Image (cartoon, rainbow, N blue to C red):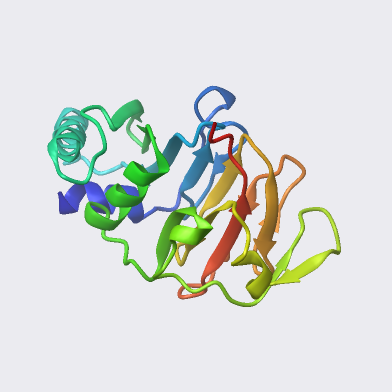
Amino acid sequence: MRKIALFLVSMAMMAVLVGCDPMGDIELTAGDSGIYVEDDGAIKYGSCEKFDKKYYNEDQLENEIDTEVADFNKSKYSSVDDACSVEKFQANSKEASLVLDFVTTYDFKNYMLNYAGFEEDGFYIGPISDNDKCEITGTFKKPHSKETVKAKDIKKMKDCILATYTPMKVQVEGDIKYISSNCKINEDDVVSTSPNKGDLSNVDYIIDDE
């Protein structure tokens, strides 16, 4: 389990474009991981790692990934039997990339907290009203605008939020309403959370929950 957690969380000096098919416009570069939120709340999580040592074994790594995914799906942390699945796994003599599909934000949150080693006070995704561990503080800005709001206003909203200490790239099929002032957003509406370790970032977004 720890080996796969390290694969997911510990990024290496490399670059991979996780193309438009699996994860929208997210480009994973050195030290990045990516989250793509679909309209129905399903999550795609992408990661990549340097894979250039002679002792690395592609088949062994793929088997370990499949075993961990199967274990999660049978655990108390998953909402259904197929809560997580492997969308894409590729490896060559230089790099390996992985995209995991989660049917709900609930399953993705549980996987990150219970399998990938994230802490409850440093990672949350889901309705703002259900967040009771991660602080929502500071100033928020509306994407591509000078409009700002305070954290106390964000806490009253009925949207969903991603809070993370870990640098990530995030894209949402729906609308991103506000982002922490320490986040950046590009012309494709891909948000880069703060690159500083221990710096909590928040992304306030809307999904179609009907």
| Residue 84, quarter of picture | top left
Spot the residue most to the top.
Answer: 21
Q: State the image coordinates of residue 57 (x, y, percent, origin top left).
A: 18, 34
Q: Is residue 59 above or below residue 35?
A: above
134 or 128, which lies in front? Answer: 128
Residue 50 seen in the figure: no
Spot the residue most to the right.
Answer: 146
- Residue at 29% across, 50% down: 110
Q: State the image coordinates of residue 72 (x, y, percent, origin top left).
A: 18, 40
- Residue at 62% across, 44% down: 206
- Residue at 70% across, 52% down: 177
Q: State the image coordinates of residue 47 (x, y, percent, origin top left).
A: 40, 43
Q: Is residue 34 left or right of residue 61?
A: right
Q: Is residue 98 above or below residue 144?
A: above
Residue 80 seen in the figure: yes
Q: Is residue 108 above or below residue 90?
A: below
74 or 210, which lies in front? Answer: 210
122 or 185, which lies in front? Answer: 122
Q: Is residue 145 left or right of residue 125?
A: right
Q: How many marks?
A: 0
- Residue at 47% across, 62% down: 164
168 or 11, which lies in front? Answer: 168
Q: State the image coordinates of residue 41 (x, y, percent, origin top left).
A: 49, 37
Which of the image's four quarters has the C terminus?
Answer: top right
